[in-house]
Image (cartoon, coloured by chain):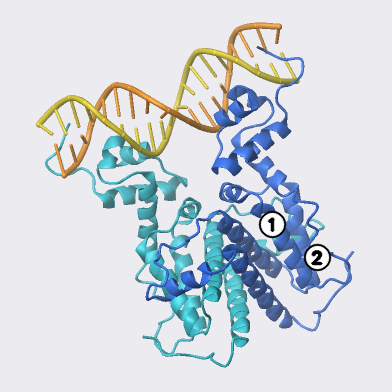
Chain colours: A cyan, B blue, C orange, D yellow
Amino acid sequence: MARPLKPLISIDAVVTAALDLIDESGDFSLPKLAARIGVSPSSIYNHVSGREEILELVRGRITEGDPLLPGVPLDAEASWEDVLRSEIRTYRENFARHPRAAPLMVMQTVRNARVIAFYERMASVLEEAGFRGADVASALAMIDSFAIGAALDLSAPGNVWDVAPGADSALGRAVEGAAGLGDRAETAFEFGLEVLIDGLRLRQGRLGPRNGRVPRS
Amino acid sequence: MARPLKPLISIDAVVTAALDLIDESGDFSLPKLAARIGVSPSSIYNHVSGREEILELVRGRITEGDPLLPGVPLDAEASWEDVLRSEIRTYRENFARHPRAAPLMVMQTVRNARVIAFYERMASVLEEAGFRGADVASALAMIDSFAIGAALDLSAPGNVWDVAPGADSALGRAVEGAAGLGDRAETAFEFGLEVLIDGLRLRQGRLGPRNGRVPRS
DNA sequence: ACCTGAACACCGTTCAAGT
DNA sequence: ACCTGAACACCGTTCAAGT
């Protein structure tokens, strides 16, 4: 065929096809991607450096989020707790729309600007709360673990542990207790979010009298 | 060659070789595994069902842990907080010895009995603390995220976020603050562990007057 | 500039054949 | 029972050739 008058591939089409494949099957390969676009695998390299870049672009696409989900309105009156809650919830909601993408993102270092911006907002609000230096980094690492874990949880099979529910064990009772829930992952996420914020607030209390709300730029 | 008088492969040797490869390169393949043992790839299938089972066996090997690291002695006097702390620390220490293994374990459902036992001990201690049913499951999910995140953190590159340290941003200051530390990942882990336990303790306080220490069977 | 097809160096897994 | 070698159906990536 050689070069067509109008390009057959666009980066946008590559990302869309990749995300579609991931949503459908939990994985993607360059041959399958190419087949879906109707093009040969090698031609993709004219638009993108390889599989890794595609994954990073998919991360960007996912975190574009849904503009119709505003979350808590973030005016200057919002407490740092509210901002944190809202940011983390939004992050999870983005992955909730593409649960099977989470495992593929884990192994990859974050380069996407929008995701960096997400962490920047968290860092900034943690500073407002009074945390400094390494504590901010530590809190971010913890939030990161929590958010990634929540995203992975969405792609996990119904039973995370291979235990008979109702078995004579604490784990069995826990599995059983969770089974009655409408959305186990969501319940666990909200529980964890409050524990996380409570724990941070308690630690903030020991930082000095600087706590409370601060106007946001 | 055909069948030798004494088997050339043992499951133990397969797991050892796989873990060695992972420690060295962060990945393993069946051909490389076979080459290291001095055998052909297909012969491995006489001992093991495939790549997935090998990974699960590696998980078991890793969580055998180091018997010389006792952690906090767990007598009946230990509070649930101490038990939790000790369990989670041990879990992380196991992965600290094999940081590059963590990313490979994430995608895989846990079937290893020793790891199930780890969660069972956590579930049981959470019940002692007064948590019930879905709350136990939610707390476990959170601990799981935290532990996995901490393990992944050990295999992460030095700079998790692609930010110039000292840049005029909260994230830049956080990266800089963490850079001065001896062990960034360890500091973040201990910070998170306390936040986690503080948060759980606060929530426990709202469960009723059942809290406090309980004798352990 | 952008696509194709052939090619390379890999994978995991199966299976008949050998002893 | 346990190993080999060939085979199958895949990968990601490169590159000369075409327009």
| Quarter of the figure that contains the N terminus of chain A | top left
Taking depth in this image into account, of A133 and B19 the one nearest to the observer is A133
Which amino acid lies under the numbered mark 1 shown in the image of this protein?
Glu
Cα separation between marks 2 and 1: 13 Å
**Left of B190 or right of it: where is A141?**
left
Label 1: element kind: helix
Residue occupying the far bottom of the picture: A209
The residue located at (41%, 72%) in the rendering is B166
The disc at residue B93 is 1
Is B156 drawn above or below residue B179 in the view shown?
above
| Quarter of the figure that contains the C terminus of chain A | bottom left
Tell me which corner region of the image, top left, top right, bottom left or bottom right, holds residue A138.
bottom right
What is the chain letter for disc 2? Answer: B
Label 2: element kind: loop
On the image, the x and y values in percent for residue A125 come to 46, 80
Name the residue beneath numbered marker 2: B72
The residue located at (76%, 72%) in the rendering is B81
Taking depth in this image into account, of B166 and B115 the one nearest to the observer is B166
Q: Earlier in the sequence, mark 2 or mark 1?
A: 2
The residue located at (28%, 41%) in the rendering is A44
